[in-house]
Amino acid sequence: MLRVTALESRYGRIPALKGIDLRVEAGELVALVGANGAGKTTLLRAISGVQPVSAGRIEFDGKDVNAAPPEERVRAGMVQVPEGRQVFGPLSVEDNLRLGAYRRGRAESAASLERVYALFPDLVERRRQAAGTLSGGQQQMLAMGRALMARPRLLLLDEPSMGLAPRLVAGIFACVAQLRAADTAIFLVDQNARAALAIADRGYVLETGRIVLTGTGAALLADEGVRSAYLGL
């Protein structure tokens, strides 16, 4: 579904991504782990069309999307949940969700809304509440729900556990696993390497803009280098 080949991106003269190769197959959950500053968010932004690329190729469903603007990628089925949630604080929960389906018809939007409420029941009783008054965990649910309103075939998740209490992190990752079970392909970026790799089919380790290791989620969890660098073992 997603294939990235020899991808490079820069901030001015400073290289941020250096020859990235990776793939995400249909229905697969792939995790990307790495330290702060490794380039994880830059890579997701490049894939979704927000960050310019200086070399390489991004293919979605076999089509080159390098020149496609972000809105065309969303229309094709590639949707990103941004780092830091970025909900529209003054708007209600339901208005935030409906904005995720602005390119969908009314009937399709209504069906998506029911699906999101079924996945995140905490949002139902808060549907009229201003998004900015929600807890961090609820805002993360809202950001994920807003992305799901667009009916993505590939969901790009950027640091969904950031800033959340451990008990809330477990709930967010349970929702991610549930989405994968429903055949949504997921590319997950998270500093919580243990939780991310535990639910991943495959994983990649990113260091200073380069992929340095890849394997199944289980294999990476068992790798001594990964355990030492990212799991504190």
Image (cartoon, rainbow, N blue to C red):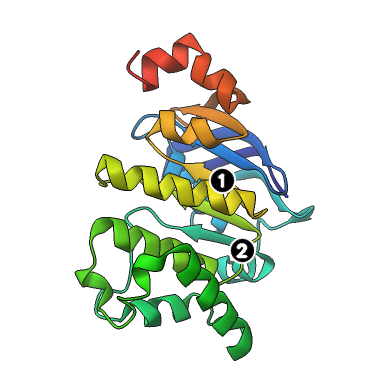
- Looking at the picture, tell me which residue is in the foreground, 208 or 116: 116
Numbered disc 2: secondary structure: loop
Residue 54, image x, y percentages = 57, 46
Q: Vertical placement of 111 versus 27: above or below?
A: below
Residue 28, image x, y percentages = 66, 43
Q: How many marks?
A: 2
Q: Residue at x 38, y 13 (%)?
A: 228
Q: Vertical placement of 73 versus 89: above or below?
A: above
Q: Residue at x 43, y 76 (%)?
A: 97
- Amino acid type, callout 1: Phe
Numbered disc 1: secondary structure: strand
Q: Residues within 10 Å of mark 2 (few under 14, many from 20)?
A: many
Residue bearing the label numbered 2? 152
Q: Vertical placement of 148 versus 167: above or below?
A: below
- Looking at the picture, tell me which residue is in the foreground, 208 or 107: 107
* Left or right: where 61 falls relative to 117: right
Q: Residue at x 30, y 56 (%)?
A: 137
Residue bearing the label numbered 1? 187
Residue 105, image x, y percentages = 62, 87
Q: CA distance from mark 2 to mark 1?
A: 12 Å
Label 2 vs 1, first from the N-terminus:
2
- Looking at the picture, tell me which residue is in the foreground, 63 or 116: 116
Q: Residues within 10 Å of mark 1 (few under 14, many from 20)?
A: many
* Left or right: where 55 falls relative to 38: right
- Amino acid type, callout 2: Pro
Residue 66, image x, y percentages = 66, 55
Q: Residue at x 35, y 13 (%)?
A: 233
Residue 205 in view in this figure: yes
Residue 11 in view in this figure: no
